[in-house]
Amino acid sequence: MKYDVIIGIDPDVDKNGVGFLEVRTRKLEAAALTFPDLLDYLADVRKKATENDQTVVVVVEASWKDTTNWHTTRWESRRVSTSKGYDVGRNHETGHKIVEMCRHYGLDVIEHHPLKKGWRGRDGKITMEELSYFTGITGRTNQEMRDAALLAWCFADLPIKIKVGK
């Protein structure tokens, strides 16, 4: 099914990355929202979509679907590894709650595997320059916002142009 609006979400305990894409116009916006603000935002999007007879889907990066993504090194202490695991678990639970609330609001929601990392940023993450190059998005963004915007863009199957060079 084709959707009029795609909302990409990169869950995080502190602030969730949110990408809003109006598919027809390719209007893309990115924000970082706390969990309560995100719930208000989703309720508002649902209300506006109903009023404008638009179809909406929420695409949540479901890192809990990947079982092989370990960010540990052999020289880390047990305490550091435990702390990382605790933080990852908290982020996963935030994602689960977002999915649950989307369903509660009657929004279509998809739990999406994390996108492949092959960009020029740290750990293969997308940079602002790369995202801006093919989406036209401007302004300051953090990594969660860029990941959420990229998730929405890719889910819409819009073209990604890559600048070749140094």
Image (tube, rainbow, N blue to C red):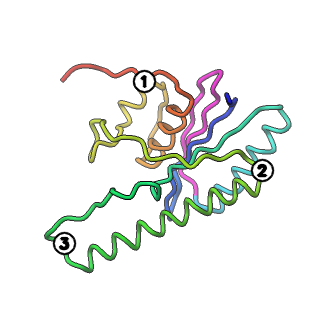
- The image quadrant of residue 165 is top left
Q: Nearer the viewer, residue 114 or 39?
A: 114
Residues under labels 1 and 2: Cα distance?
Answer: 31 Å
Residue 17 in the image: state x and y as whole percent.
Answer: 51, 50
Determine the residue located farthest toward the left in the rendered image: 75
The quarter of the image holding the C terminus is: top left
| Dot 3 amino acid type | Glu
Q: Report helix, strand or loop for mark 2.
A: loop
| Dot 2 amino acid type | Gly
Q: Report helix, strand or loop for mark 3.
A: loop
Q: In this view, does 57 lie above or below 54?
A: below
In the picture of the structure, the residue carrying the numbered disc 1 is 160
**Start-end of magenta stretch:** 18-33
In the picture of the structure, the residue carrying the numbered disc 2 is 106
Picture residue at 64% right of the left edge, 55% below the top: 38
Of labels 1 and 2, earlier in sequence is 2
Q: Residue 76 carries which label?
A: 3
